[in-house]
Amino acid sequence: MRLALLSAAVWLSTAASAAPTVPEQQQWLDELAGKFELSQDALNQALAEAQYQQAIIDAMTRPAEGKPWHQYRPIFLTDKRIEQGAAFWHEHDTLLARAERELAVPAQIITAIIGVETYYGAHMGTYKVLDALYTLGFHYPPRGAFFRSELGHYLKLAEQQQWSLDEQKGSYAGAMGMGQFISSSYRHYAVDFNEDGHTNLFDATDAIGSVANYFHEHKWQPGEPVAHRAVVTDEQAAEALLSPALELDYSWAELAAAGVSTDAELAPDTPVKLLKLDGADGPEYWVVRHNFYVITRYNRSPLYAMAVYQLSEAIRQAHEQQP
């Protein structure tokens, strides 16, 4: 079985990184040219400068979100990350307060996103964005169409921002800046928060404003809780309420009728979802609400959303304790 799995992994790796045929590549270039109003010369230049990176393909096959919750949580909920989050908040208190006031997104959520994504700007990625999007768009069939589209967005973004094509570095998936925006999100949600005529997500000011704007655009509800720890009295009934969908698929009345309880007082018609996580001491059940769903608009992993939420609460408590 071990040999069979190894052989399958090698086959998948080879298939994922196989170069497209000349007709395929030309078809993709034609599609990008039409969709993004790019010249063939611009596309040819991009492909001439881009370099295939096997490390990017390798990274795509082992995301942290594949870990169980009890292994995923300690990556982000550390004393150091919490302390530095409180320090980041203190340093940028005026900007975060302005983002709260103008965009109605709490400072702790903005800070936690930047903390999870780049350790408050310390680790914004080492891969050239051009290489990442080319490698995944042209050599990773499972999501090739998506990353080719992101390549088109990046080329337009480079044109708008007057970047050299290989200037920006980011994650293995081509995300950029302190908040790790993919190119389409950069173009759609980034804001010029310091009003200097540029949207620079590698700078804290625009990054804070842009993360807040992303959540604002996705209908963050100020003052509404994110999640409640739950107790389940009938595990069989609870299992029937679980689903891989991220949308809020039940009302609180329906969960309560199935034996789910929480210390929070919720109106019967409150939209909710039951979440089960693999805790160190057994299953953890959570009742999550609209703002949890909003966090999953940033990253579709429930583990990611829960890590952001719990880190944000820890940062808020640490910030309140500062002199």
Image (tube, rainbow, N blue to C red):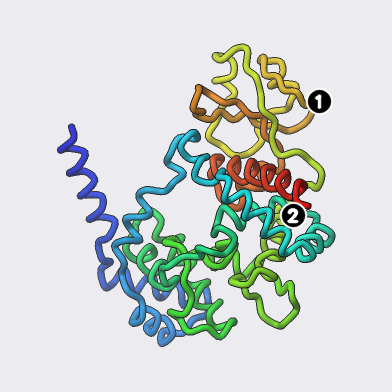
Q: Indicate the quadrant where residue 203 lies.
A: bottom right
Q: Residue furthest front?
A: 323
Which residue: 72% across, 22% down?
262
Q: Disc 1 marks which amino acid? A: Glu
Q: Badge 2, how many Cα within 10 Å: few under 14, some, many 20+?
A: many
Q: Which residue is mark 2?
A: 107
The label shown at residue 265 is: 1
323 left or right of 123 in image: right
Q: Indicate the quadrant where residue 126 lies.
A: bottom left
Which residue: 21% across, 43% down?
8
100 left or right of 315 in image: right
252 shown above or below 69 = above
Give the x, y percent position of residue 161. 58, 82
Give the x, y percent position of residue 83. 63, 51
Q: At numbered mark 1, what does the secondary structure look like: helix, strand or loop?
A: loop
28 shown above or below 81 = below
176 left or right of 139 in image: right
- State the CA–CA distance, disc 2 to disc 1: 25 Å
Q: At numbered mark 2, what does the secondary structure look like: helix, strand or loop?
A: helix
291 left or right of 81 in image: right
Q: Is residue 31 visible?
A: no
Which residue: 25% across, 68% down?
21
Give the x, y percent position of residue 318. 70, 46
Q: Earlier in the sequence, mark 2 or mark 1?
A: 2
296 shown above or below 145 = above
Q: Badge 1, how many Cα within 10 Å: few under 14, some, many 20+?
A: few
Q: Residue furthest right?
A: 101
Which residue: 38% across, 54% down?
60
